[in-house]
Amino acid sequence: TQLLEQSPQFLSIQEGENLTVYCNSSSVFSSLQWYRQEPGEGPVLLVTVVTGGEVKKLKRLTFQFGDARKDSSLHITAAQPGDTGLYLCAGHTAGKSTFGDGTTLTVKP
Amino acid sequence: NAGVTQTPKFQVLKTGQSMTLQCAQDMNHEYMSWYRQDPGMGLRLIHYSVGAGITDQGEVPNGYNVSRSTTEDFPLRLLSAAPSQTSVYFCASSPVTYQPQHFGDGTRLSIL
């Protein structure tokens, strides 16, 4: 079983602060996705990264895929209360997907 | 455009009962999948389908059956409900890849 470890598990910060969450594995993935999930709803896809070393930006969010395609990070600049939610990473290979347990982010106004 | 629609949103069952969770998508996506999400955990893959008539097992398939007679529908059947199956169930779809792109809002299932 391929495992994806996310850290930290919980993060509570003030509006305007920067933060980084991590997604690590000992396995190589063909691609990796990040999702955001709000209470009572399904996950919403934020980004897919497929190339080792790839960096993608989505407004204040920056996603990076590790060179060896075993890890990834999500950096949020100047966090806002609207960024509050559960952030999930998922690695995909050989037709199967593996999700991390998520990072619960709370941004206080 | 409705996307992925799951019904029911909530359900309470007694141990031993059977039921079917419905999932429908209107995006003509070939790939559909079912996940369960338990408190404090990520999503675990139950079953998936790469097209009508083709299904395969995921990480936690025991106690669940699926079928895919049409591109649009991918129902999940609980054969004999057990308390360990209490969870939130999500259905997802993708156009061509195994990476879920669109999720439904989930079915919250409690088994007493």
Image (cartoon, helix red, strand yellow):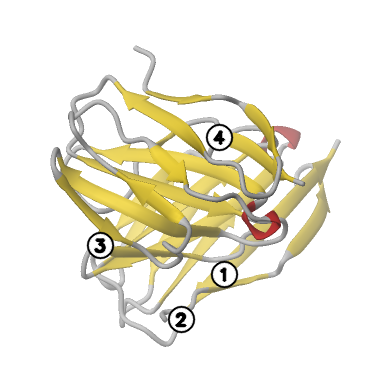
| Local secondary structure at mark 4 | loop
Q: Which amino acid type is shown beneath numbered disc 2?
A: Ser
Q: Residue at x 23, y 63 (%)?
A: A95
Marks 4, 3: nearer the viewer? 4
Residue that numbered label 1 is attached to: A22
Position of residue A31 relative to residue A2, above or below, is: above
Q: Which amino acid type is shown beneath numbered disc 1?
A: Tyr
Q: Residue at x 50, y 41 (%)?
A: B90
Residue that numbered label 3 is attached to: A50
Residue that numbered label 4 is attached to: B106
| Local secondary structure at mark 2 | loop
The number of numbered badges drawn on the structure is 4
Q: Tell which subunit mark 1 falls on.
A: A
- Sequence-first disc among 3 and 2: 2
Which quarter of the figure is the N terminus of chain A placed in?
Answer: bottom left
Residue that numbered label 2 is attached to: A25
Q: Residue furthest front?
A: B16
